[in-house]
Image: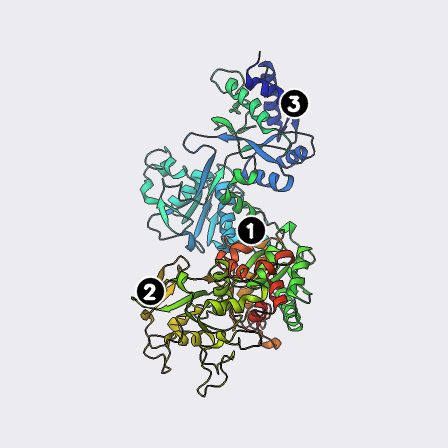
């Protein structure tokens, strides 16, 4: 009679009679054959067979093709095997009880250095070795992923050379590497073997990279979490380390802070996953674990002839498993992304930016004659500076046609604004590769839309009490004054609509009276213009121009300040631009910013200076949208280098990225108000780029009756003709 557990294994073994282990070297094949004999002699099933793959890449291909079943890989190779072949990790190594199946990559500096993760550019750096995990993969991948380091043409060694002042990266001594990557290396005592990737280079490996920092050659060392404790406070017998104290060093955290060297759990660049055994998606991982678990119970004890976690008998290290492994554990979430973790995964994605896989040119999609003209000049200017990849211009009739072309991989990139970014992401699956940045004193983009009210202790109403109040708007169809506040109030059910064309009617029924410039149209309720006052003669009432004194940001604020309305929907800077003596017009000259407050979505009120925490939505900057298979790091690397030559209006290189005047247009390709191209950082999807508040405002404008095929915002706006198309607003500078 068999126990329940044994019966289950018997059933599983029927489907997997043998496991073919793929080995990456002659020595590993030798150890594998000995393990197979040991397991067979102990009656461990299923049968273990060994096959020669001779490299990790060959092994993963063999497993995918059904010629082998399992191999042990490190993090970088698990990423490649999962991404390219769909392999899954099923058994993980454990190295010690304290940290289990991982270790941590850290950046170490001297405590008195004042260096942070945000000020690494231009410092000198110490690395364990080229292509090593904690010394190269994680720090370089992290710096690229976070937008701190840009790599044109995915040339990572060149990018690192440009970023750091000088470095010691053992192994980066070939012809293809810039000389500065070995500049700090010392070699052996005789000065020979400088920058070699072995112990003859004094600054090689974890201890070597830390020594490079300790001896003052470099200002930051990229090592693992245990390196500093192992080489300080008398724990090392090496003469260079005997007098070092751990308290004289600190870690650089991802958030810009520093921390004690023992706080590596919360202050690190990435948690690095342990090595793991990977198999095909259809292979039962529990059977593989059962096999290895039986093996480690018998062959991890002192005195047994075969030792699973020892490679000394084969004159090598880390064969099949790391020698430092204490046990193997089953991986419950058999998914490479989950095993690697977000920090490490994002570093690997950035590192996979490969010059050999880059296209020779990027097809840039444009939608007007003027944009084609400017794009052609941009392509020529970039080519003259040898910027890569080269730009090819592709013409389309509409932004949505550009999205279709990119989805089909017939084009590569297009610059889009808010509502278009939503459609590009939700309908066509595109992702942001870079975005625009605007000057601090130009709030025309990437600003906060706010609900502004007067400070009133006796009547401190909230956003939930707006029904029946009088409202001031910048204009119909404008973002801060109409689309965002009305969209959010509809989305939250505060304003209720009955049909597609019902939004103006619903707004007029919700507020007791309003001034919504340009709402004086047929079929629009007259209450939407009731508070408007026109010009000094009372003419041009409710017009979308400066002749209506309550038009635009300052006008909507004036409507509130003069007590015509109870709430003004404006941008966050409006109150500051018109109070405390900034606006000398008679109506504004005595106004104080402290006399106004903001209505927060959570039902609270806040001071006008707290707009970053209390707002209806942040209006996003324009973004360059691409197919998810396109390397966002290559595209950002190109544009970051390009703006060095062509970004400033006085660049002296002829072409200007952020100026359309030479092409008889405005905001062509990029906004004229942009001052730089920014990395996306953690905003990797259209939803993260736009933000949940802005998306809520877009979706609020799209009532269920109008959703249409593909759930396209722009479709609703076109069909109903109730709200001017957001895209038109953006091109006319009405954001």
Q: Position of residue 150 (x, y in %)?
A: 53, 56
The numbered disc on residue 156 is 1
Q: Nearer the viewer, residue 283 or 134?
A: 283
Q: Judge the density around disc 1: few (<14), some (14-19), many (≥20) Cα neighbours within 10 Å.
A: many
User: What residue did someone put label 3 on?
Assistant: 18
- Distance CA(mark 1)–CA(mark 3): 42 Å
- Does any portion of residue 361 appear in the rendered image? no
Q: Is residue 299 above or below residue 53?
A: above
User: What residue did someone put label 2 on?
Assistant: 460
Left or right relative to 285: residue 448: left
Q: Residue shown at 61%/42% (left/top)? A: 83
- Distance CA(mark 3)–CA(mark 2): 75 Å
The numbered disc on residue 657 is none
Left or right relative to 61: residue 666: left
Which residue is situated farthest in the top direction here?
1
Q: Nearer the viewer, residue 564 or 326?
A: 564
Instruction: Name which quarter of the figure residue 224 lies in.
Output: top left
Q: Is residue 643 above or below residue 54?
A: below
- Distance CA(mark 1)–CA(mark 2): 57 Å
Q: Judge the density around disc 2: few (<14), some (14-19), many (≥20) Cα neighbours within 10 Å.
A: some
Earlier-in-chain disc, 1 versus 2: 1
- Does any portion of residue 570 appear in the rendered image? yes
- Pointers 1 and 2 in contact (C-beta within 8 Å): no
């Amino acid at each position: 009679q068999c126990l329940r557990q044994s019966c289950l294994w018997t059933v599983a073994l029927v489907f997997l009679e043998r496991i073919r282990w793929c080995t990456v070297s002659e020595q590993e094949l030798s150890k594998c054959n000995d393990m197979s004999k040991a397991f067979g002699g102990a009656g461990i099933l299923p049968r273990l067979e060994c096959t020669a793959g001779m490299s990790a890449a060959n092994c993963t291909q063999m497993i995918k093709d059904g010629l082998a079943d399992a191999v042990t890989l490190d993090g970088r190779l698990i990423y490649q095997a999962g991404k390219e072949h769909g392999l899954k990790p099923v058994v993980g190594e454990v190295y010690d009880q304290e940290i289990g199946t991982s270790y941590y990559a850290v950046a170490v500096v001297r405590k008195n250095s004042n260096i942070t993760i945000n000020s690494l550019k231009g410092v000198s750096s110490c690395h364990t070795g080229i292509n090593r995990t904690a010394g190269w993969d994680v720090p370089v991948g992290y710096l690229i992923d976070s937008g701190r380091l840009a790599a044109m043409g995915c040339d990572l060694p060149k990018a690192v050379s440009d970023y750091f002042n000088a470095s010691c990266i053992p192994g980066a001594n070939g012809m293809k590497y810039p000389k500065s990557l070995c500049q700090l290396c010392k070699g052996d005592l005789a000065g020979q073997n400088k920058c070699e990737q072995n112990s003859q280079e004094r600054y090689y490996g974890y201890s070597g990279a830390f020594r490079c920092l300790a001896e003052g050659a470099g200002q930051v060392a990229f090592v693992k979490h245990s390196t500093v404790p192992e080489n300080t406070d008398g724990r090392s017998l090496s003469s260079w380390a005997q007098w070092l104290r751990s308290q004289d060093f600190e870690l650089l955290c991802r958030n810009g802070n520093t921390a004690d060297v023992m706080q590596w759990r919360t202050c690190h660049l990435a948690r690095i996953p342990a090595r793991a055994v990977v198999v095909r998606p259809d292979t039962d991982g529990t059977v593989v674990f059962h096999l290895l678990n039986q093996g480690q119970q018998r062959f991890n004890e002192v005195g047994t002839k075969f030792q699973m976690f020892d490679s000394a008998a084969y004159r090598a290290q880390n064969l099949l498993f790391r020698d430092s492994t204490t046990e193997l554990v089953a991986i419950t979430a058999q998914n490479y992304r989950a095993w690697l973790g977000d920090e490490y995964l994002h570093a690997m994605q950035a590192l996979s930016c490969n010059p050999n896989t880059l296209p020779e040119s990027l097809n840039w999609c444009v939608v007007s004659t003027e944009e084609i003209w400017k794009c052609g000049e941009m392509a020529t200017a970039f080519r003259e500076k040898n910027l890569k990849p080269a730009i090819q211009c592709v013409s389309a009739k509409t932004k949505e046609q550009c999205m279709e072309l990119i989805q089909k991989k017939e084009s590569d990139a297009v610059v889009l604004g808010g509502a278009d970014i939503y459609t590009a992401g939700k309908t066509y699956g595109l992702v942001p590769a870079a975005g625009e940045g605007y000057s601090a004193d130009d709030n025309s983009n990437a600003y906060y839309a706010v609900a502004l009210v007067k400070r009133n202790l006796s009547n401190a109403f909230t956003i939930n009490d707006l029904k029946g109040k009088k409202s001031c708007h910048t204009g119909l169809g404008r973002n801060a004054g109409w689309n965002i506040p009305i969209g959010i109030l509809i989305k939250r059910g505060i304003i209720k609509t009955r049909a597609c064309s019902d939004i103006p009617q619903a707004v007029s029924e919700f507020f007791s009276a309003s001034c919504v410039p340009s709402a004086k149209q047929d079929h629009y309720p007259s209450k939407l213009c009731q508070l408007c006052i026109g010009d000094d003669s009372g003419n041009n009432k409710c017009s979308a121009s400066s002749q209506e004194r309550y038009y635009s940001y300052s006008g909507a604020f004036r409507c509130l300040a003069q007590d015509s309305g109870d709430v003004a929907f404006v941008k966050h800077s409006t109150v500051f631009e018109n109070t405390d003596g900034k606006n000398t017009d008679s109506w504004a000259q005595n106004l104080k910013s402290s006399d106004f407050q903001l209505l927060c979505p959570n039902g609270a009120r806040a001071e006008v200076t707290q707009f970053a925490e209390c707002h209806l939505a942040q209006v996003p900057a324009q973004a360059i949208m691409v197919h998810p298979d396109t390397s966002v790091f290559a595209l950002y690397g190109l544009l970051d280098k390009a703006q060095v030559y062509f970004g400033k209006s006085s660049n002296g290189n002829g072409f200007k990225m952020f100026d359309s005047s030479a092409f008889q247009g405005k905001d062509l390709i990029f906004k004229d108000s942009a001052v730089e191209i920014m990395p996306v950082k953690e905003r990797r999807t259209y939803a993260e780029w736009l933000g949940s508040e802005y998306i809520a405002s877009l979706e609020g404008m799209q009532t269920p009756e109008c959703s249409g095929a593909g759930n396209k915002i722009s479709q609703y706006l076109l069909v109903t003709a109730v709200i001017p198309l957001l895209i038109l607003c953006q091109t006319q500078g009405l954001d």
